[in-house]
Amino acid sequence: MKKVDEILARTESGLPQQSWTSKTSTGDLSEVAEESTTRRVISDQTKALVNMVFARFMAIYGHKFKSAFETEQEIMLAKREWAMSIQRYSENELVAAVNRCKAELAWMPSISEFLKLLNEVGGDHGLPSAFAAYQEACKSAEHPLQHSWSHPAIYFAGRETGWFELRSESESEIFPRFSYHYDLLCRRVREGERLDIPNPIAIEQKSDVTQANQMLEFAKRYQIDESEACQLLYYLTLPKGSKVRARQFALSQETANTHGWQLPTEA
């Protein structure tokens, strides 16, 4: 085992060195563990966070930590299991859970004990974990102002991330962005700031009525079926400034040009 000062050596980013227990980094664990056909990818950020957690445990528990692992191979295997279990949690959540371990536990916790602490510290001020918040945001991204949010911070994190992006982009692309905004909002809440979600009825109903009226007026002006008008003006229901809205507008414009119709110019 390395000395404590080597273990706690930090990079310029403030995180411990990537490999403080072995010459083999966390990312090379595939060499010592048999991979399944559905191998789970562990990001570099998660590897760094696992190293941080283990470094803290080493500093807190000393010889008790060392006695939990007989070989460096055991440490590497343990780090992989921890990485797969905590990869959806933010750095602040992990630090808070480690601090709870320091105050309450005489021995390094098991993964299940640590996850329980993560859920508890993540639930302060009624704030769910970052991933639980992300799941709620994705499920309600279609009509965010009609949803009864478990905490206002989730709504504002979703709004900052982009409702369209939450509906259309993959988890690997959008979750880090959502987690970043959610973490900032959680800090504000913990500092005592109150977050109030806008009035849903006044805003969303006004938008829906405007779009419906435009479609009906278009059908009446050019004496076409209302369903055809709705199909042509469907782009009005898509997020403003999005690529999908621009593409839909272009397709509708082609159809309108063949008939001499003029579409609402706002796309």
Image: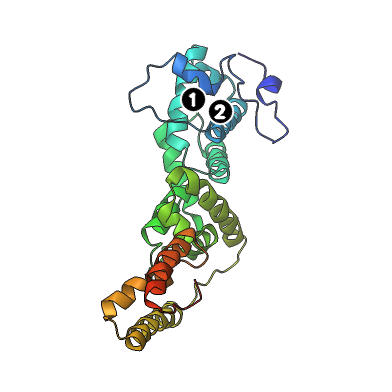
Q: Which residue is mark 2?
A: 54
Circle 2: residue type: Phe
Res. 154 in view = no
Closest to the observer: 241 or 24? 241
Closest to the observer: 171 or 84? 171
Q: Residue at 44% across / 50% down in the picture?
A: 169
Binning the other alpha carbons within 10 Å of mark 2 as few (below 14), some (14 to 19) or many (20 upward) gives many
Q: Is residue 89 left or right of residue 95?
A: left
Local SS, label 1: helix
Tell me the tag on residue 79. Answer: 1
Q: Is residue 4 left or right of residue 84?
A: right
Closest to the observer: 3 or 209? 209
Local SS, label 2: helix
Q: Is residue 67 above or below residue 102?
A: above
Binning the other alpha carbons within 10 Å of mark 1 as few (below 14), some (14 to 19) or many (20 upward) gives many
Residue 95 locus on image (x, y percent): 58, 41
Residue 260 locus on image (x, y percent): 41, 78
Residue 61 locus on image (x, y percent): 57, 26
Q: Residue at 54% across / 55% down in the picture?
A: 182
Instruction: Give the image quarter of residue 209.
Output: bottom left
Q: Are marks 2 and 1 in contact (CB under 8 Å)?
A: yes
Instruction: Give the image quarter of residue 234.
Output: bottom left
Distance from the alpha carbon under mark 2 to that under mark 1: 8 Å
Tell me the tag on residue 181. Answer: none
Q: Residue at 26% across / 80% down in the picture?
A: 225
Res. 118 in view = yes
Residue 82 locus on image (x, y percent): 46, 30
Mark 2 or 1: the one toward you: 1
